[in-house]
Image (spheres, rainbow, N blue to C red):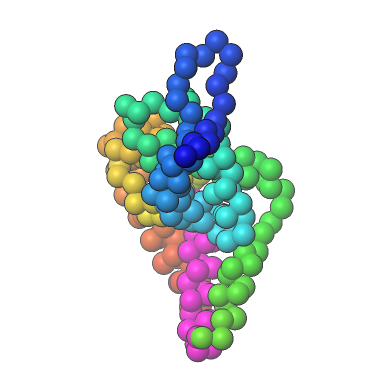
Amino acid sequence: MEIIAFGLRQKNEKFKPLMDEYTLESVYNKHYKNVYNYIAFRINNHHDTEELASQTFEKVIKSWGRYNPANPLEAWIITIAKNVVTDYFRKNARRQFISFDSLVQAISPNREPEEIVVASEENRALMMAMTRLKDKERQILSMKFATELKHSEIANILGIGENNVRVIVHRALKKLRNLLEEAEGDESK
């Protein structure tokens, strides 16, 4: 049986085991869904989400030798995904996107016209409200609801206190609720 190793080791770095194919498969199978959900929640575009999830796992492979097993693996992987998304936004800062997935979902043949309109409006309102939140609030809500990370794990990823995460989640949800109510009130006028 041949074991294929993945990863790189820097010059003058102590030897650390590289990622073998079995470890890669295990890590990928266990964490892909949360990585995908986190990225999808942040960018709302299926095709780019898949690409960014792949980039995330490429970076996991390349930096496996620097992973510290004393820290939660999922938090480390989500940190990498967060950095990949940040790079994506930097690269695409000047472009405005309409999600192809939103369009496909909006014209799905399996839904009644009324359902399509209601779901489309709710999604549009939520996405518009999310854009009015601070980046840190969006990041934390993405980690909380798309990947179901615990407050302690989010705090570890962002380098802030757990209580700070709780406060930001509470305030961001309150702000989001107010923004949605405000948008609903504007529509009824």
**Which segment did they paint magenta?**
111-133
Q: Is residue 60 left or right of residue 74?
A: right
Q: Is residue 11 above or below residue 69?
A: above
What residue is rendered at 44% in x and 65% in y? 180
Q: How many labels does the image show?
A: 0
x and y percent of residue 16 in the render? Answer: 45, 21
Q: Can residue 34 be seen in this view?
A: yes
Residue 21 painted magenta = no
Residue 124 painted magenta = yes
x and y percent of residue 73 in the render? Answer: 37, 37
Q: Is residue 155 visible?
A: no
In the foreground, 183 or 39: 39
In the foreground, 151 or 12: 12
Q: In this view, does 162 lie above or below 181?
A: above
What residue is rendered at 39% in x and 26% in y? 68
In the foreground, 171 or 47: 47
What residue is rendered at 42% in x and 51% in y? 29
Q: In this view, does 21 lie above or below 188?
A: above
Q: Magenta stretch: dominant SS?
A: helix
x and y percent of residue 113 in the render? Answer: 53, 88
Can you name the residue that lies furthest to the top here?
Answer: 12
Can you name the residue that lies furthest to the right here?
Answer: 94
In the foreground, 169 or 183: 169
Q: In this view, does 30 lie above or below 62?
A: below
What residue is rendered at 62% in x and 64% in y? 99
